[in-house]
Amino acid sequence: MHGALALARLMLGRTSPNPAVGCVIVRGGRIVGRGATAAGGRPHAEAVALARAGAKARGATAYVSFEPCAHQGRTAPCARALVEAGLRRVVVGCVDPYPPVRGRGMAILRAAGIEVSGGVLEDECRRLNEGFITRVTRGRPFATLKLALSLDGRIAAASGDSRWISSAASRALVHRWRSEADAVMVGAGTVLADNPRLTCRIAAGRDPVRVVIDGRLRCPPRARVFVERSTAPTVLVTTSANEARARRRYHGARVEVIGYEKARDDEIDLRALMRDFGRRGWSKVLIEGGAHLAGSALGAGIVDRVAFFVAPIVIGAGTPAVEGLGLARVRDAIALEGLGARRLGGDLLLEAEIAPARRARPRRA
């Protein structure tokens, strides 16, 4: 199963709207076939591994990180393919929560007399596809809020300068996260202050869709996020009132403009936006700031995990990490769970999940 997970991990960010799945087929103690879900979600991992195993699959054991599909889509159900290949045993990492599958794949295997073992490395298998699971169960992508900040909680100096708060090792990890995400999202303030490209700059990486939240159309059309050459498009999200003006303003650039009804102070309904992203088949969104978008996303209840890269520096006056939450009492704070810490270069990476029972009351942002 560790081998199946390793295969699936190589395809993170490339298989949407399908999960990233790995499959290893073993016969007589030797691997006779292996495969991962291909880019775009097809062919599935099981089909790739079976094709490589050929006749050696008969009587073998398949290790699959995600439950084999049971429904007829553009391809035949993988559970049926495993049955027809004559597998003796199938070991499954975790159940697929997608309603047309959800236990049916394993039921097909058992009905055919195949021995099925489930829940092997289940936590790791679920974590690998947390984006897909969140999308099919909650109707939106899994969102990670990433911020680089000083020890005293600043993401920029008083002048707005923020390069570089985090270490080279931290930035390399963020580029890997971009490669694994369907989209990376920033606010207009980040574009104005940093003029980022939001591309992935690691070997064999891929660019995510770049999303800019700009309710007041403050970003210049020549900002790098709009004109930088990339295989991925840029999406500008603004208010409905500004949608037509945005289309004229960014005419000629490879920019998709989306307009939403104004929620408050020309800001965007992030909950509705994330639901739309889910309908596009996006499973993971990386929110990279700045402070205002961080507060808006947390207040809207769309963040699932926070990842704070804390640098061993003190800035003093400057931009706080999160703005605009406006919580009056400590008891109303957004609670976190599963806090973990690790060193990256000179930084400390703090990661935690948003505690579902203690989410801030969702509001429009």
Image (cartoon, grey):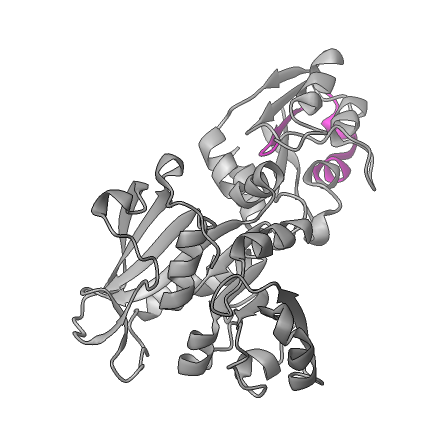
Query: Which quarter of the figure has residue 325?
Result: bottom left
Residue 180: x %, y % from top left: 54, 56
In depth, the one of 330 and 169 nearer the eye is 330
User: Which percent across, then down, holds residue 64?
Assistant: 61, 32
The magenta span reads: 49-66
Residue 138 position (above or below residue 202): above
Q: Residue at x 52, y 42 (%)?
A: 130
In this rendering, the answer to whether 167 lies above or below 31 is below
Please tell me which residue is depicted at 32% across the width and 62% down the height of the picture.
322
Decide if residue 207 is in sight here: no
x, y percent for residue 269: 54, 58
- Where residue 273 sits, quadrant-wise, is bottom right
- Residue at x-position 32% and y-position 46%: 334
Residue placed most toward the observer, 9 or 235: 235
- Residue 171 versus residue 47 in the image, above or below: below
**For residue 2: magenta?**
no
Residue 17: x %, y % from top left: 68, 48
| 59 part of magenta stretch | yes
For the residue pair 33 and 303, the one nearer the viewer reads as 303
